[in-house]
Amino acid sequence: MTAPLSGPSDAPVVDMKDVTIDFPGVKALDGVDFRLLPGEVHALMGENGAGKSTLIKALTGVYDIDSGSITVGGSEQRFSGPRQAQDAGISTVYQEVNLCPNLTVAENILLGREPRRFGRIDYRAMNRRAKELLGQLELTIDPSSTLGDHPIAIQQLVAIARATAISARVLILDEPTSSLDADEVAELFRVMRRLRDGGTAILFVSHFLDQVYEISDRMTVLRNGRLVGEYPTATLDRVKLIAAMLGHELDLLEEIADTVAKSGPHAGEPVLSAKGIGRKPRVHPMDVDVHRGEVVGLAGLLGSGRTELARLLFGADRPTSGQTEVNGKPTTIRSPRAAIAKGFAFSSEDRKAEGIIGELSVRDNLVLALQARRGFARPLSKKTKDDLVHRYMEALDVRPRNPGTLVKNLSGGNQQKVLLARWLITDPQLIILDEPTRGIDVGAKAQIQKLVADLAADGMGVVFISAELDEVSRISDRIIVLRDGHCIAQVGTDCTVKELTALIAAGAQS
Amino acid sequence: MIKRIGASPLLWPALALIALLAVNVVLTPTFLSIRVQDGHLFGSLIDILRNGAPTMLVALGMTLVIASRGIDLSVGAVVAVSGALACAHIAASADPASAATVITAMGIATGAAVGLGLWNGMLVSVFGVQPIIATLVLMTAGRGIALFITDGQIVTTVSAPFKILGAGFAFGLPVAILVSLAVFALVGLLTRRTALGMLLESVGINPIASRLAGVRYRTIVFAVYVFSALCAGIAGLMIASNISAADANNAGLWIELDAILAVVIGGTSLLGGRFSLTGTILGALIIQTLTTTVYTAGITPELTLVFKALVVIAVCLLQAPKFRALLSRKRRPPTHVTPASDAPVQSLSVPVPSTSAMVTK
């Protein structure tokens, strides 16, 4: 399976052979080989549930392997905990930064290995050392500033600096870019290249294909816990990569384009019409109209006000200005409850913190919004509930098809489907979707995009937010372009991704 | 079937209770015997039920508060206030033995308890004060209020109707336990027959997501504190009635800790969310049986608390997932269910929502 490689001839710094991990009922990894060479950025690709996280956890000592071998730097390892993996030179920076936000940057970088003088921490030496380490990565961050005051992107870079302080041979970056904007990603990539050129082996996991192609030298593709293959990035184009990840061709994406094209320009009644809606200081007053059967895209960089605007429309935050009309009648929406009563629905970008109720079953999560609207005193009968749950799990292809499963045990894509179903069950007239496809696998992504197009075709008003411009432009009938809390343009379907990017980029410059 | 019982979170508390009872039978062979006297049942088991009734009641209220991700430290103080108000009213009235006086006294006491609950609920749900701090205020202040009401004295009453709640019998059983069980049944029905339990759990697990899904977050949090205080108020009446006196210093002292323990032993997590009322009842019974055991086993009073602590630690450890994993020697985190993704990507469709379920507004 593994193609012989041209390129760096060094011995691999990590060599996993025939690694198998059994979970009750599932082979999470099934005889997988994985090699990581010094001085390369290696992308680990696969759908959710393909075994990427499991492989990383095996490599970082979180999980025991059931068979196979892991060799790091020439010597075979048997990790019994993350600490040993760290001692072997494997460092991990997780999606959620796991540093101490209340400590300073320097303290975080040198935590556990602080320079001491007379038995006390030598803060001056510590700040100096931290500055050196940051300097090696060409980062100018004040070492004595509090970590929590910096944006997530900087915190991530600090986490990487910390990894270099431990002089890691292997750096694992698990979805490091999911909450970064374009500039921050560029900065991260600069640091990654620098480390790679210094000989560090970097394992990179990301759902953004653009980024994978930009940064990686080689990739390993997993599917259903098995190795599909190991490829130099240059030899594997997108279509082949997606085919390798999914194991089948995707024609859904074309179907979406058809649906959007068929439904054409919409002339439905306005569901929502907000005039001069805004909230100081993040959202400046702007007009937003959503018609029946129309998908309105919100495009802009992170922090441009796209999420903030969505929250205003749903009453999650209260606007400080503007009037709202729903179905032509003046209305004030002061809370999510009020919005729901008007037939609105809102799926937040932060699935875990603001979406799912993790410890409750899929069934309870599905009926939550409808039940909340009915009030506690009028419970849905068991039969109605089962019927609804069954129908929507089937329709949205939620897996596993067991309504008793706790939602936290579902994969990201399936959690997202549960959230969509939760709202669809309330039969909304307007649905606001903030990043509904973030961090989910390609298959589920296509399904959800298709679903959105279908919903609009059936007459629902949709507000769609995504960081991926091609997604926004493919799905939307009209796009509101935002920058720094201002609406800078409204464009129609004829606007290409290139033009859209130019609009946002031009905005970003001025 | 066996697997299902093994997985039930109620298994360990139930076993612990049975084991404790067994220890008692060994120590005192007559422990389980119940005799009938004047049409009332008597025996150690009945004593456990009667003495455990106030804790049980307070623990029921506490369960709902904890499920909402909160905690109520003020219940002991509410017990004292409620008892003090009732006894003060009866002692000051012209006719302490009349039913009307007693009913008014109970009305005043429970009314005051509800008022204190509103105060807690307001601090937590409206002003967003951390529950432990918000209720700490009343925990400290409440006992002061009770002392103020009773002038720092122990107020004794002579009132036959007042004695019924704490010391009386009905259908052969102590009235106190009947009241507690009635409240248990009522809350059970209210939370599990309506959607209240699910909405409460949802608020406790993820308040932000619940609010965005349209759950009345504030109202629910408000309500659980009021309910908890009401339970504490009734428990205060039971205790005062049982001894025919209000002791502002000692009535309900540390009952908040016993109640929290009962909830935890019963398998409800202090982190909020899923709760088990049956578990709480078992927990309260364990605590009361322990106290009784200590007396019947002749353990010296100095060791009482140590003994109690040991049993509680044992039960809590047996419930801790990590400890159980250690016992079963399986070091494996729970697996995520991997969807079989070999199936072709299917296109999603939206079913037409059934109108019967949609009737709203």
Image (cartoon, coloured by chain):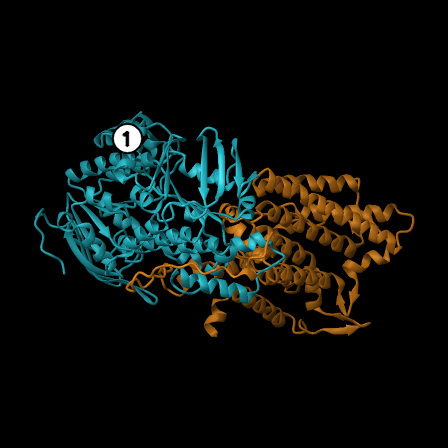
Chain colours: A cyan, B orange
The chain holding disc 1 is A
Tell me the quarter of the picture where residue B292 sits: bottom right
Q: Which residue, given by chain and number where applicable, does mark 1 sit on?
A: A130
Q: Residue furthest right?
A: B94
Left or right position of B331 against A387: left
**Image x and y of residue A171, in percent:** 23, 44
**Image x and y of residue B26, in percent:** 61, 72
- Image vertical order of residue A284 relative to residue B270, above or below: above
**Image x and y of residue A132, in percent:** 24, 29
- Residue B200 in view: no
Question: Which residue is at the front of the view, B355 or A352?
Answer: B355
- Image vertical order of residue A199 relative to residue A52, above or below: above
Q: Could you tell me which secondary element the residue under label 1 belongs to?
A: helix
**Image x and y of residue B250, in percent:** 71, 48
Q: Residue at x 78, y 41 (%)?
A: B149
Question: Which residue is at the front of the view, B90 or B187?
Answer: B187
- Residue A407 in view: yes
Tell me the quarter of the picture where residue A189 sits: top left
What is the total number of numbered labels drawn onto the structure image? 1
Left or right position of A218 against A86: left
Question: Which residue is at the front of the view, A422 or A36?
Answer: A422
**Three-letter amino acid code at the position of disc 1:** Ala
